[in-house]
Image: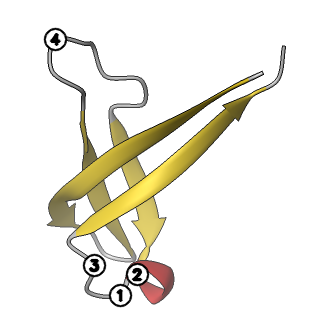
Amino acid sequence: MSKKVVMFEYEKETKNSVRYKEVPDEGTAPIVGSLYVQKWFAGSSKTIEITIDKKD
């Protein structure tokens, strides 16, 4: 098992969701890329953090 915390920053709003773009660690490729979160949950958050728990 391995866990990875991925940071995202606000990119733009769509009709019902907010799009966030991944902020990759220095010198690494993005893991997720873009992430859409529903507006009712995202609110006015400019950054979000997602934890990925990989089960081996």
Residue 17 circle label = none
**Which amino acid, by three-letter code, is at mark 4?**
Gly
Residue 27 circle label = 4
Assign a secondary structure to mark 1. Answer: loop
Q: CA distance from mark 1 to mark 2?
A: 6 Å
Label 1: how many residues lie within 10 Å, few (<14), some (14-19) or many (20+)?
A: few
Q: Quadrant of the N terminus?
A: top right
Mark 3 sits on what residue?
A: 45
Assign a secondary structure to mark 2. Answer: helix
Q: Nearer the viewer, mark 4 or mark 1?
A: 4
**Which amino acid, by three-letter code, is at mark 1?**
Gly
Q: CA distance from mark 3 to mark 4?
A: 26 Å
First reached walking from the N terminus: tag 3 or tag 2: 2
- Residue at image location 28% in from the left, 78% down from the top: 45
**Which amino acid, by three-letter code, is at mark 2?**
Lys
Mark 2 sits on what residue?
A: 39
Residue 43 circle label = 1
**Which amino acid, by three-letter code, is at mark 3?**
Ser
Outermost right residue? 56
| Image spot of residue 50 (x, y percent) | 50, 51
Q: CA distance from mark 1 to mark 3?
A: 6 Å
First reached walking from the N terminus: tag 3 or tag 4: 4
First reached walking from the N terminus: tag 4 or tag 1: 4
Q: Quadrant of the C terminus?
A: top right
Q: Is residue 6 left or right of residue 55?
A: left
